[in-house]
């Protein structure tokens, strides 16, 4: 399935209605986040009022989409007790919300009867999926696109089931 996958900023720029992300891993080893994760482990927190210290291209792409009327939602399925990485993500989620995302958390113990995709993904306008494939240690491997209508429909339904059951960020305690 080799293919060139457009950057996230281009994929979300093409959205007209919705962009949803499902995250299912408890640990990520994304090189671009290594320094921030290490700083968080050392006690650093971001001041939301100092937007220049944390705002980045991802946040801008989300904010631009939301300004166009696109609904952006993220659901995270997590094990409990949560990993340090999930604690880090939880501490940074206010940044996603400031950009315009709606974020919910689903403890894995509440998801046993749901069918959850095997890979993290974004669904754009219920027409295109970008799967993100990771190694066992959390290292990012590759993104892959899928636009087969039946596959997109199944994954959009899986996201909707998780979303319906998940806990809004402001109510989720770690």
Image (cartoon, helix red, strand yellow):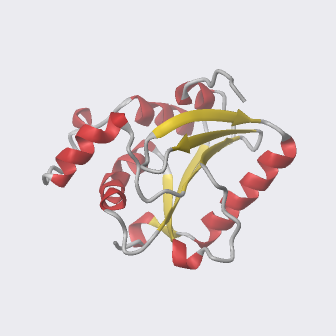
Identify which residue is drawn at 54% across, 39% down: 66
Quadrant where the image shows the C terminus: bottom left
Quick one: which residue is furthest to the top in this view?
4
Q: Tally the numbered discs.
A: 0
> Is residue 139 depicted above or below 142 in this figure?
below
**Image-based side of 71 in relation to 172, left or right:** right
Given residues 173 and 146, the one toward you in this image is 146
Quick one: which residue is furthest to the front in this view?
136
Image position, residue 14 (x, y; %): 66, 27
Residue 47 visible, this angle:
no
Identify which residue is drawn at 51% across, 31% down: 64
Quick one: which residue is furthest to the right in this view?
150
| Quarter of the view holding residue 123 | top right
Residue 166 visible, this angle:
yes
> Is residue 4 depicted above or below 133 in this figure?
above
> Is residue 71 depicted above or below 161 in this figure?
above
Image position, residue 103 (x, y; %): 49, 57
Image position, residue 82 (x, y; %): 37, 69
Identify which residue is drawn at 66% across, 62% down: 116
Quadrant where the image shows the N terminus: top right
| Quarter of the view holding residue 133 | top right
Identify which residue is drawn at 23% across, 38% down: 35
| Quarter of the view holding residue 17 | top right
**Image-based side of 124 in relation to 29, left or right:** right
């Amino acid at each position: 399935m080799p293919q060139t996958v457009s950057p996230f900023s281009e994929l979300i720029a093409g959205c007209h209605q919705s962009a949803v992300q499902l995250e299912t891993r408890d640990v990520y080893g994304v090189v671009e986040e290594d320094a921030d994760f290490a700083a968080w482990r050392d006690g650093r927190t971001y001041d939301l009022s100092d937007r220049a210290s944390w705002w980045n291209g991802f946040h801008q792409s989300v904010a631009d989409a939301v300004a166009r009327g696109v609904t952006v939602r993220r659901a995270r399925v997590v094990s409990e007790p949560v990993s340090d990485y999930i604690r880090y993500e939880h501490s940074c989620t206010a940044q996603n919300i400031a950009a315009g995302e709606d974020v919910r958390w689903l403890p894995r113990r509440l998801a046993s009867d749901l069918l959850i995709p095997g890979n993290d993904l974004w669904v754009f306008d219920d027409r295109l999926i970008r799967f993100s494939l990771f190694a066992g240690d959390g290292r990012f491997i590759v993104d892959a696109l899928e636009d087969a209508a039946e596959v997109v429909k199944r994954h959009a339904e899986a996201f909707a089931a998780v979303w319906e059951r998940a806990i809004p960020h402001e109510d989720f305690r770690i």
